[in-house]
Amino acid sequence: MKQGVLTRYRVMAYVTAVMLLILCACMVAKYGFDTGKDLTLVVSQVHGVLYIVYLVVAFDLGSKAKWPFGKLLWVLIAGTIPTAAFVVERKVVREVEPLLAKAPTPAPAKA
C-alpha cells in the first residue's frame, strides 16, 4: 500500500465531515428559522457527491488494508454521522501508518 492511498482517504474524510457539519447548520437554518432553502439544496448536493467520492476512497483503503467487512462498513458509514468521520479518521491513521512503514520501498531505477 502506498502513502497516497492514506492521504486521499484523510483528505476526503475531512472534507466530507466538514461538509456534513455545514449541511447540519443549513438544515437548522432551513427548518428552525425558515431561511436558506436554496443554500441547503446546494450544500446537500455537494455533500452527496463528496460522500460518493469518500466511499470509493475509503473502500480502496479498506481493501488494500484487508479490513474485515464490519470495520469497512463502520468507516463507510462514518461519513453520514456528524463528527464521526473525524474520530474514525484518527483511528484509521493510527492503524494504517504501521502498515505503510512495513511496506517494502521500491528500488531506484537504474539508468
Image (tube, rainbow, N blue to C red):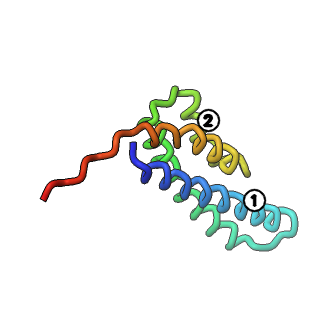
Residue sitting nearer the eye, 72 or 41? 72
Out of 102 and 1, give the one closest to the viewer: 102
Residue at 68% of width from left, 57% of height from top?
Answer: 20
Between 91 and 84, the one lying in front of the other is 91
Q: Which residue is mark 2?
A: 74
**Quick check: marks 1 and 2 in contact, CB under 8 Å?**
no
Q: Amino acid at mark 1?
A: Cys
Q: Report the residue marked by disc 1.
A: 24
| Residue ID at (59%, 53%) | 13
Badge number at residue 81: none
Task: Tell me which numbered mark, 1 or 2, is placed earlier along the sequence.
Answer: 1
Name the residue located 80 percent from the left edge and 73 percent from the top edge.
Answer: 35
- Horizontal side of 25 relative to 105 (left or right) equals right
What secondary structure is marked by label 2?
A: helix
Residue at (62% x, 35% y) in the render:
74
Indicate left or right for 14 with 59 as reference: right
